[in-house]
Image (cartoon, helix red, strand yellow):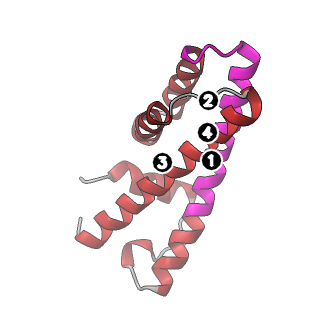
Amino acid sequence: MNMVDAGALMIMFLLLITIYYGFLSISIDVFTYKHPKKVYMAIFSIFTVFISLRVSYLLGFIMLLSFLFLQKLSLKETLIVAFSTQFGFMMGMAVIMIFLTSLGFVFNIPSLQMNMTFEDMMKLLMKGSK
């Protein structure tokens, strides 16, 4: 993996972590009016994005549910926040896929110059630093 590919991968992960944190924060604020510490949510977002992309979406979703239960939310609040966060994260992945493909064509980055399907993006994310 060359430096441009590694940089593109790092940018992709940072964007996904930012999107996940944003949707988690907004979902908790809107649906529960609670304010967990931002540091905990940021650390949790980093771990959950990496687990969701590297291991399993189901395991990432289970981690999200456990984090929300630790915040002492009711079952209804937990499910609403979890589903809205996951839905927003999936939509954010689609937007990032389109955005990075466009940047690949504009700035002539070979690893991003493809019509990325969801599977292509997942292969790129799963490949990581191998």
Q: Nearer the viewer, residue 113 or 68?
A: 68
Q: Is residue 101 left or right of residue 79?
A: left
Q: Do the residues labelled 2 and 1 touch (CB within 8 Å)?
A: no
Which residue is denoted by mark 1 in the rendering?
Answer: 90
Q: Magenta residues, as a range?
A: 70-96
* Residue with the mark numbered 2: 35
Please name the residue that numbered disc 3 is placed on: 17
Name the front one of labels 2 and 4: 2
Labelled pair 1, 3 in contact (Cβ < 8 Å): no
Residue 121 sits inside the magenta stretch? no
Task: Name the foreground residue: 26 vs 78.
Answer: 26
What number is the disc on residue 25?
A: 4
Residue drawn 50% across the image and 34% down it: 41
User: What residue sits 29% from the left and 63% below the top?
Assistant: 6
Tag 1, which secondary structure? Answer: helix
Q: Is the magenta stretch mostly helix, strand or loop?
A: helix
Distance from Cα at disc 2 to Cα at disc 4: 8 Å
Look at the image and tell me in which quarter the N terminus lies: bottom left
User: Residue flagged by tag 2: what amino acid is it?
Assistant: His
Q: Where is residue 122 in the image (x, y as percent from the top left)?
A: 47, 52
Badge 3 local density, few (<14 within 10 Å), some, or many (20+)? many
Q: The disc labelled 3 sits on which kind of residue?
A: Ile
Marks 4/1: CA–CA distance:
16 Å
| Neighbourhood count class around disc 4 (C-alpha, 10 Å): few under 14, some 14–19, many 20 upward | many
Q: Nearer the viewer, mark 3 or mark 4?
A: 4
Tag in front: 3 or 2 = 2
Mark in front: 1 vs 3:
3
Where, by quadrant of the figure, is residue 24 drawn? top right
